[in-house]
Amino acid sequence: MESKVSEADFSLKKSDLSFFFEPQSVAVIGSLREGYFGGYVVVKTLLNAGFTGKIYPVNPSYQEVLGLKVYPSIKEIPEKIDLALIMINRRSVPNVMRECATKGIKAVIVVADGFAERDEEGAKLQNEIVKIAREARIRIIGPNTAGIVNSANGLMPDPYEPGYEKVKPGTVAICAQTGMINPQAFPYADLHYGVSKICDYGNKCDIDECDMLEYLESDPATKVITMYLESVRDGRRFLEISRRVTAKKPVLILKSGRTKEGAKVSASHTGALAVDDQIFSAACKQAGVIRLEKFREFFELPKIFSLQPLPKGNRLGIVTFTGGVGVLAIDEAAKYGLSVARLSPKIAKKLNAIFPGLGKTVVDIGPPMAVNNYMTIYSDILKTVLEDDHMDCLFNVIWTSPFKEFVEEYLKFYGEMQGNYQKTIATWIYGPSIPLVNELSSGLEDLGFPVFSDLEMAIKALGIAYQYSDRKKGEA
Amino acid sequence: MMGKFSIFDQIKKEGRSILTEFESKKLLKQVGIPVVQTRLARTKKEAVLQSQRIGFPVVLKIVSPDVIHKSDSGGVKLDLNNVTEVKTAYSEMIKTISQQYPDATLHGVSVQKMARPGTEVIVGTSKDPQFGPVIMFGLGGIFVEVLKDVSFRIVPVSQRDAQEMIKEIKGYPLLQGVRGKESSDIPALVEMILKISNLVEEYPQIKELELNPIFAYRDGALAVDARIILE
């Protein structure tokens, strides 16, 4: 029997990244000096997040850190290690990789930077660690990465101080070729939607966007995947895998390097070859990937998939407090193939009975609320609109009013509504007080009603949800 | 099958990578793509004979692997209506080309039916370093050259991909027929895109391929000029 590791054997296990995301034990190799960055912070964030596995700090100059025994080297650790995090000088990384190989570690996150993204020496070092890893069948995330998160088991080895303890668990997986998505950079504790996994794959010397897509494809905690890319390592594989994944869950991708200048800078950021943007767009269309245009969308748009049911069609209902917003929304909706729903005669009649002239395409709550008991009529109107089977999704505008009592009433009403509707609802909230707008927004999101930062974003959320559901229907 | 292979083999044997227009069209015809009727003539006499067979008006084009920009160098003569015009055009063409490309290998001239004008579209393929063969569709002439109004897909494309890439270009209304212009046969264009996609998928040795222009008609579509470059 040949015992040589063939490339084919190796790729069989390609998408099994469970050692990274569900390790029983983690070795942290790096500086343990108290500060805002490094091994010390990694150990601290793991402890704070309540990581369920064992933590083994490794450093020859320490005996103990944060109540944990420190080991002078990896080989001194008496137990089996599933995952190692390396954050040391780049020139020392190959040696530590060899130690990991000897120890039988199968998953390594190389946080250290200064590799292919920096200079020729870095590129050589990167090749060297890849070679060591291939021979020992070690998988690598990085180098030049801020690491990963699994919200379910408290795996939050952040090399930077995030200032909060836990990432709120949920169904959105966030991957990027940058640390801009890691806990230190984004308020995951304050968000009102939860996150399943986070991965900054850095220079992608081994694990890349395709491996992550494959892993997340079968990750039961993940319902929607949002990804930031600067490059694609293997275009054909990307097309094949993303096409398969989008049939199961939505994949949203923000890609930089759309301009020639951007592509140039991207190449020096992670040392990757730029992709022709038109070709990448074509691949996304063929794969059913939702292409994002703005950084803000990256965090906002997944909410619609995470919190709401998919729309069954493209008929858009609009409830607003001013006609103007309704018209703007209609303009915006056309971009995504949404068409404004004509209310069914039955519902129009019901609405007209609540207030004369209310039963129109754009349901304008402004006039009736000015003359009636506000909350009673609001709840009657919204419930009636949501009964209409001539409508698949709703752009829901809420004016907070300047009064806290109103916000409380709204939250009570939406609390009762929770789960009692089948339509996809995207909400936009405005009003004369930022604290009240924020309070109502977070309250609604906690109840499962996603709130978007502006009306265009809300409409886009409904638009992409419709497009995704329509494509899925076409394939079924 | 054999025919297709033999073209590639022969080109390779001759140390070339560019197929002549005549060879390109022959190959395309073999895979079922409608191309304008084209015959090879090695002498003036043959040119006259072939144009009589095809029926006037005809076009003469130089057939040489060494002449890339045929029309810029006097290698294309359009709208020839009778034997006299064909004879004159032939003599002039051979003279000009021989002066401009004294070392060029001349296979002869191709005699082609002067195609009835239609809406000009273009289908091309190339290879992307990350995605491999990609296919492009656009409206011909200034639309592709100046406005870059083209759409791309990765090969192989599905029927839906082909339909989408046609609808995606800004000039799509021109294909639907505007201001009294006839509408174009979209299913025929979809068919052409699918056949090209299959061809480059089956033959990875094709590096670039361009059908430019294709005349789209109310009923059908016809490739008028074609170019294939091998790896």
Image: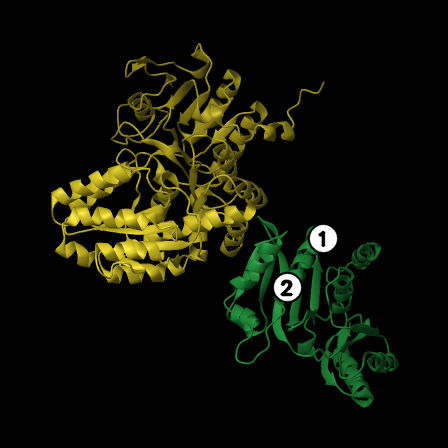
Amino acid on which disc 2 is placed: Pro
Residue at the spot of label 2: B187
Residue A95: where, in percent of width, then height?
48, 23
Q: Considering only vertical position in the picture, is A97 above or below B207?
A: above
From the viewer's perspective, tell me whether residue A45 is left or right of residue B54. left
Residue in the image at 87% along x and 79% along y: B46
Residue position for label 1: B205
Relative to residue A342, is residue B197 drawn left or right? right
The subunit letter for the residue under badge 1 reads B
Q: Quadrant of residue A180?
A: top left
Identify whether A57 is placed above or below A150: above
**Res. A256 in view:** no
- Residue A278, can we see it? yes
What is the crowding at mark 1: few (fewer than 14 residues within 10 Å), some, or many (at least 20)? few
Question: Which chain is represented by yellow in the image?
Answer: A
Quadrant assignment, res B187 = bottom right
What is the total number of numbered labels drawn onto the structure image?
2
- The residue located at (43%, 58%) in the rendering is A337
Could you tell me residue A302's position as x and y percent? 38, 43
- Asked if residue A106 lies left or right of residue A303, the reply is right
Residue B10 is left or right of residue A417, and the answer is right
Which chain is displayed in green in the rendered image?
A: B
Tell me which amino acid carries mark 1: Gln
Callout 2: SS? helix
Where's residue A460, x and y in %?
37, 53
Quadrant location of the C terminus of chain A in the rendered image: top right
Q: Depth check: A405 or B189 in front?
A: A405
At a point 44% along the width and 23% down the height, the residue shown is A22
Residue A197 point in image, percent of width and height: 40, 32
Q: CA distance from mark 1 to mark 2?
A: 28 Å
